[in-house]
Image (cartoon, rainbow, N blue to C red):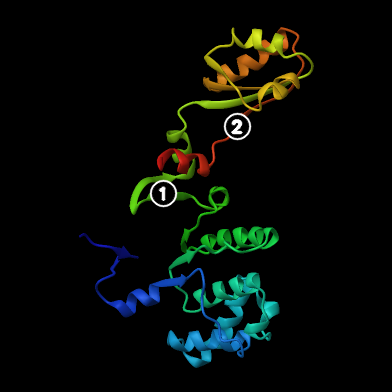
Amino acid sequence: AGKAFVADADVTGNKDLIKQLVGYLPDNFGVYPTLRVWEYLDFFAAAYRVPRKQRPERIERCLAIANATEFRDKLMGALSRGMKQRVGIAKTLVHDPQVLILDEPAAVLDPRARVAMRGLLRDLANLGKAVLVSSHILPELADVCDTVGILNAGKLVAAGPVQEILRNVRQTRLVDVHVLGNPDEARAAMKDAPGEWEPVAEGGADSAANGQLRYQVQADEAQLAAALQLLMARGVQVLSFSEVPADLEDVFMSLTK
């Protein structure tokens, strides 16, 4: 029950309007292997009723946005998966939709292609498009998305700005302290640090022997700075002192237990 709207249009109303407003790229999309890339895009432009005279310029623009201009005259069947994904983005843009829905756009891409895809998604957002991405590659989403929603068993269990979700789920901070030499002096100093500092057994005895300590902390920025100053005042040689950032995998595991 309820209603859904896209760009203020009821999705149960004018279906032709919704199709013009939304561009959808599924995880696996069909290609016509004997068509050249520009022919493939022209086919979809015609299906979306883009006027014939406007199609060449529209195709060139979409290829440029998707960083796929070099593939213009290649056969669709000769493209790698990463190349096809970029052409798929161009196809999704060909009717100039306001909303893009992309299902696992980077799921099977190699690392270099994933980096390029992240940049492309940000470019699309900068063009004023609303970009909705469905993905299981959670760490990469934090680098791309402004807002996230987490689904579990068909229910939305969390939604909001990325940093807000990260803060709300992890109530305490994790801080790594790496010192030179014997860490006993650092441990003794941290007992007097402002805030609450609870040692975490991370990496076992080997990490501690190498001067690597991890704490679960309830402290604000001023207290973190004071703790570092305390270590230095006690003569501890600090190699690094840093907070371990939460990531979306931590959030997902916490919310879907």
**Secondary structure under badge 1?**
strand
Residue 184 horizontal/vertical position (percent): 70, 10
Q: Which mark is residue 4?
A: none
Vertical relation: 10 (above or below) 162: below
Whole-number angstrom distance, CA of label 2 to CA of label 1: 22 Å
N-terminal label among 2 and 1: 1
Quarter of the image where one finds residue 117: bottom right
78 left or right of 58? right
Residue that badge 1 annotates: 150
Q: Residue furthest right?
A: 181
Give the residue drawn at x 51%, y 52%.
Answer: 145
Residue 147 horizontal/vertical position (percent): 45, 49
Quarter of the image where one finds residue 209: top right
The answer to whether one can see residue 149 in this image is yes
Amino acid found under the numbered disc labelled 1: Ile
**Secondary structure under badge 2?**
strand
Quadrant of the rendering where the N terminus is positioned:
bottom left
For label 2, the crowd category at 10 Å Cα-Cα, with few meaning under 14, some 14 to 19 and many 20 or more, is few
Front-most of residues 151 and 39: 151
Residue that badge 2 annotates: 244
Quarter of the image where one finds residue 158: top left
Q: Residue furthest front?
A: 205
Front-most of residues 243 and 214: 214
Residue 206 horizontal/vertical position (percent): 72, 24
For label 1, the crowd category at 10 Å Cα-Cα, with few meaning under 14, some 14 to 19 and many 20 or more, is some
The answer to whether one can see residue 67 in this image is no
Residue 225 horizontal/vertical position (percent): 62, 19
Give the residue drawn at x 30%, y 77%.
Answer: 15
Vertical relation: 188 (above or below) 173: above
Amino acid found under the numbered disc labelled 2: Val
21 left or right of 208? left
